[in-house]
Structures are given as structure tokens and as C-alpha cells.
Image: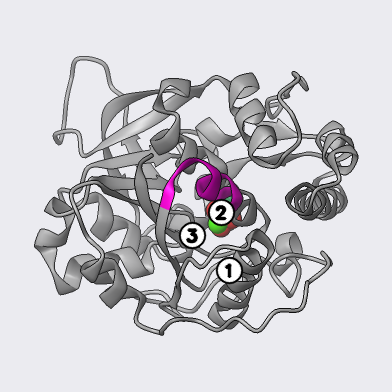
């Protein structure tokens, strides 16, 4: 099993990614960052998830604000709690510390992947504190950016938009980066069939995940008119645990920081032949969505029978 540190901003899809990671990898630690909701809430949610899983994975709190600008949150998608109205089991867990960057630096090892599921503030701060850190880890698999549409703006994805300076620092760091952007994650859309399967499984993880998806589908239906959700963050975990499910290509990726309309956009150089800057990331373009959902459902104790999976309509 591969070893990883999950940097996250739970967040409904972060929660599913954390369950998936604990089933298919050795999770050395969780670091939390301000993103979907403020840091105190993302940290509380990470602790709740470790309690629900019954694992002793340490949780280290990190950055409460981006490198520049004001914190960006998404309560319209994730609720004020970050996990909507899902049931919160009682537990007495506390964060192991509030120096996520120090933990990222200390836990570095050649076989450790950093899986970044939120704004890249903690990861960028680790790189600023020790630029050679990127050479001491296996790589960074991140859910962020997009090679086509955005979500927070027509062209910017939330994690990159919430801290463009951090995203720019990571893409320029020389790290081995796998970018799982919206162009990939929109290929794996969950529907109420997933919720029904999870409810039927009736295990603690399945019940928790069923509430997560049901809550998220309801919120997105009210926001978009579509009762479905993209499996964003689990894709970045699968890129490490099940790389055979994802096809990627080396690309030069830059992050727009100044544009009025384009701040937070990941500019992916997809020109054939003509090449500008050298490639600095493996950009994921295709995923075996059926198999990916099957792996996720199996990790949630919900069996492996095919569910059928949609892709986000253009
Ligand atoms: O744009 C999707 C990303 O932003 C996901 O990581 C989701 O959890 C939010 O953080
Ligand atoms: Ca996230």
C-alpha cells in the first residue's frame, strides 16, 4: 500500500476521499486548511471522520487564510459546518497540533505522496520553508484547477481560485505533480442510486457516506437544478492508489493571479507540437468512471455491482 498525507478542507467530497484513502493506502497524517469552510470547521470535520472510521490518524491544523487576499469559502455547497446537516457522532478527539506545515516537512519520505484536496496554502508554505522538500516526497496529487471549465468562475476552479498564489508556487516548485482538475472530475457524477446503495449497505461508513451524498445532492439540486455531484477529491486519491484508472499527459500549467475575469485559472498549454514552457505537471484527462465509482463504493462497504455513472452534461 502506498503511503500518503492528505491535505484537505472537508468538505463532503474530502470526507469520501478520506474514507477511500484509509481503505487503500497507509495514511501517515491529515493536514487541514481553510477552504470550503473556515479552518476550525475543516479541522473539526477531519477529526469527526477519523472518529467515524475508528482510526488514529493524526490531524494537524494548518493555514487559516490564503497567501494573499481574503479567505474564500463555499457554505452554499457544503453548509456552514462543511458537511451540511449530516449526523455528527460524539467523540473526544483533538488536533495533534497546529503546525501542518511542520508536519508535512517532518513526515516527508521518498514513498510518501501528498494528496492535496483543498486550497494549496499549506503545501505552498512547506515549499517556501524548504524548497528541497519536493525532492524528499514521492509527489503531489492534487484535486484542483481545470483544463476546461471552472466552477467558482467560468474559468477558475475553487481550490485554485481560493489561493492562486499558492497554486502558482506549487506548479513552479519542480514537484512531481498530478493535476486532477474539473475536466477529469466532471466525468464521475454521483446520483441518488449511490445513496440508495449506501443506505442498503447499512454499515457505519456506508450510512455516513449515504448522508454525505444525499445532503450534497440536495444542495447542488437547489443551486444548479441537477441532483448530482462530481466525485472531485476521491479522484486525486485514486490517481495514487489506482493509477491504472486515469490517463494523463505532461503539460505546462500556469496559474493566473492578476486577471480580472481569470484570477485562479489554471492555464494548461495544450498546443500540439509547439511548446512554450516545459511540462511541470501530469494533467489527468480521462478516468475509467465506472471502475472508479466501483472502487469508491467498495471502500464504503457498498459492494461492487455496477451502478452506472454519469458525466456532467456540457
Ligand atoms: O472545486 C472542487 C474542490 O473544491 C473540491 O476539493 C471541493 O472539496 C472544494 O474544496
Ligand atoms: Ca476539497
SS category of the residue bearing label 2: helix
Q: Where residue 46 is drawn, which disc sits there?
A: 1
Residue 264 in percent (x, y) is at 43, 56
Please say if 51 is above or below 241: below
Q: Is mark 3 within 8 Å of ligand 2?
A: yes
- Whether the residues at callouts 2 and 1 have beta carbons within 8 Å, the answer is yes
Report which quarter residue 125 is drawn in: bottom left
Asked whether 307 or 260 is in front, the reply is: 307
Ligand 2 visible in quadrant: bottom right
- Residue beneath the point at 23% across and 45% down: 138
SS category of the residue bearing label 1: helix
Please indicate whether residue 81 sits to the left or right of residue 13 in the image: right
Q: Is mark 2 within 8 Å of ligand 2?
A: no
SS category of the residue bearing label 3: loop
Q: Earlier in the sequence, mark 3 or mark 1?
A: 1
Please say if 155 is above or below 99: above
Alpha carbon distance from label 3 to label 2 = 13 Å
Q: Residue under circle 2?
A: 18
Please indicate whether residue 155 sits to the left or right of residue 130 in the image: right
Few, some or many residues within 10 Å of mark 2 (<14, 14–19, 20+)? many
Q: Residue under circle 3?
A: 118
Asked if residue 307 is among those painted magenta in the image, a careful observer would answer no
Residue 150 visible within the image:
no
Amino acid at each position: 500500500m502506498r503511503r500518503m498525507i492528505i491535505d484537505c478542507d472537508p468538505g463532503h467530497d474530502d470526507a469520501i476521499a478520506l474514507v477511500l484513502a484509509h481503505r487503500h493506502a497507509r495514511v501517515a497524517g491529515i493536514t487541514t486548511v481553510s477552504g470550503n469552510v473556515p479552518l476550525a470547521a475543516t479541522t473539526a470535520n477531519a477529526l469527526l471522520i477519523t472518529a467515524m472510521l475508528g482510526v488514529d490518524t493524526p490531524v494537524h491544523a494548518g493555514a487559516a487564510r490564503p497567501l494573499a487576499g481574503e479567505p474564500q469559502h463555499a457554505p452554499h455547497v457544503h453548509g456552514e459546518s462543511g458537511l451540511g446537516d449530516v449526523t455528527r457522532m460524539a467523540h473526544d478527539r483533538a488536533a495533534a497540533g497546529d503546525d501542518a506545515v511542520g508536519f508535512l516537512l517532518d513526515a516527508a519520505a521518498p514513498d510518501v505522496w501528498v494528496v492535496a484536496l483543498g486550497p494549496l496554502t499549506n503545501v505552498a508554505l512547506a515549499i517556501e520553508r524548504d524548497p528541497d522538500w519536493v525532492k524528499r516526497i514521492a509527489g503531489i496529487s492534487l484535486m484542483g484547477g481545470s483544463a476546461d471549465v471552472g466552477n467558482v468562475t467560468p474559468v477558475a476552479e475553487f481550490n485554485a481560485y481560493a489561493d492562486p498564489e499558492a497554486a502558482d508556487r506549487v506548479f513552479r516548485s519542480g514537484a512531481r505533480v498530478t493535476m486532477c482538475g474539473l475536466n477529469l472530475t466532471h466525468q464521475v457524477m454521483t446520483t441518488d442510486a449511490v445513496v440508495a446503495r449506501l443506505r442498503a449497505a447499512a454499515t457505519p461508513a456506508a450510512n455516513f457516506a449515504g448522508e454525505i451524498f444525499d445532503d450534497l445532492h440536495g444542495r447542488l439540486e437547489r443551486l444548479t437544478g441537477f441532483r448530482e455531484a462530481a466525485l472531485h477529491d476521491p479522484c486525486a486519491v485514486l490517481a495514487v492508489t489506482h493509477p491504472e484508472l486515469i490517463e494523463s499527459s505532461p503539460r505546462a500549467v500556469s496559474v493566473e493571479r492578476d486577471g480580472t475575469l481569470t484570477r485562479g485559472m489554471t492555464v494548461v498549454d495544450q498546443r500540439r507540437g509547439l511548446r512554450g514552457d516545459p511540462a511541470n505537471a501530469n494533467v489527468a484527462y480521462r478516468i475509467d468512471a465506472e471502475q472508479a465509482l466501483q472502487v469508491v463504493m467498495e471502500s464504503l462497504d457498498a459492494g461492487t455491482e455496477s451502478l452506472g455513472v454519469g458525466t456532467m452534461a456540457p
